[in-house]
Amino acid sequence: MRQPTLSLGLAMLAASALAQTPAPVIPESAYRQGMPDTITPPPVAASTGPQFNRSGFGSAYARAGRPTIAVLWNREFTDMLQQHSASQVSIDTLRAGAVSGEAVRVPGYSAAQVSGATIGNTTITTQDVKTQQAQRSSPVERVDLQMRSAFMQTMASSGVRLVDRNVVMRTTAAKQKGGGLDAQQVETDALTRHAKLLMEVLNTRDAASPTGWATYVSIKRLADGVVLAEGYMDGRLPEDAPKPAPRFEADPRGGFREIVKPVTVGDTGKLVAEQTLARLGEALNR
C-alpha cells in the first residue's frame, strides 16, 4: 500500500510545482502581426443603435436651404460686453513773468516762480476699454490641431458650408470707416452677415474619454438665438451602437487573441463631428 501512496504524493507534488511555474514571457515579434486573419470572425448582430446617416443629414440640410455655419473652436460666444471707463488727468501750465517777492501760493510752484506769471489748467479725459473673459484651457497644440482637422474635415465632407470667424472679422473690419474699432461689434456684424447658424465647440478635460478630453457642442440660430441642438460627447460610441467585426492573431502559446485598435485623436474628432451632425439633422427635420 505504500507504493501507490508514494506515487500519488509525487504526482501531486509535480502538479503543484507546475502550477507555480510562471508563464513564459513571449516577445511581440512572435505574433503574426500584419498577417491576414487566422480565423473567420464570428458574425456581428445588426444593431439599431444611433449612428450617423450621411444621406439623411444631407437631405435635411438641403431642405433647410444649406445654411452657413460659423464655428467657434474652443471659444465661447458669451454675454460679456466691453466695459468702458473714463479717467481725467489735470495738468497745470505756467508761463514765466516778472519775479517779485509777493507770496503767491500755487500747489507745486514756489512764490518766486509764480509771481507775475500766467497760470493755466488743462484737463485730459482718457477712455479705457476693459473686457475680462476667462481663458479656456485646451489640449496641447498637436492634439488640438488633430482633433480640429478631423472635426472640420468631417463637416466639410458632409456638405456643410462652414464660415471662418477670423476671415469674416478681418474683411468686415476692413470695410468699416472711422477711427477706433469695437472688436465685439465687428465680430457680431461679421457673424450675422456671413452665417445663419453659430456652432460653439468647447473642449474640456474628462478622464472617461479615451483621449482625456470631451467636447461640448451647442448650435444656435443667429437671427433669434434659438438653440437648435446641444451635446456632450466623450469620444466613445454608445453602448447600443454597432460594433466592428473583431480581428484576431495567433497566440504562440496556442489559441488566438483579439487585436484591439487604439482610439486616436483623429477618430475622436471624426466621431464628435458625426454625432454633432446627427443632432443637427434631427433639429432641421423638426
Image (cartoon, rainbow, N blue to C red):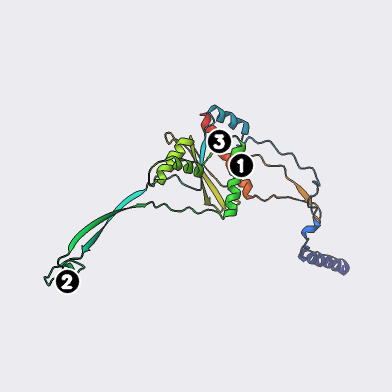
Instruction: Please identify the quarter of the rendering in which residue 238 is found.
Output: top right
Q: Nearer the viewer, mark 3 or mark 2?
A: 2
For label 1, the SS is helix
Kindly check if marks 1 and 3 are in contact, taking CB atoms under 8 A apart as contact.
no
Q: Is residue 29 left or right of residue 47?
A: right
Q: Which amino acid does the dot numbered 3 rest on?
A: Arg
Q: CA distance from mark 1 to mark 3?
A: 11 Å
Instruction: Please identify the quarter of the rendering in which residue 275 is found.
Output: top right
- Residue 112 is tagged as 2
Figure quadrant of the N terminus: bottom right
Pointer 3: what residue? 161
Relative image position of residue 35 (x, y in whole percent): 80, 49
First reached walking from the N terminus: tag 3 or tag 2: 2
Q: Which amino acid does the dot numbered 2 rest on?
A: Ala
First reached walking from the N terminus: tag 1 or tag 2: 2
Q: CA distance from mark 3 to mark 2?
A: 76 Å
For label 3, the SS is loop
> Residue at the location (54% across, 52% down)?
206
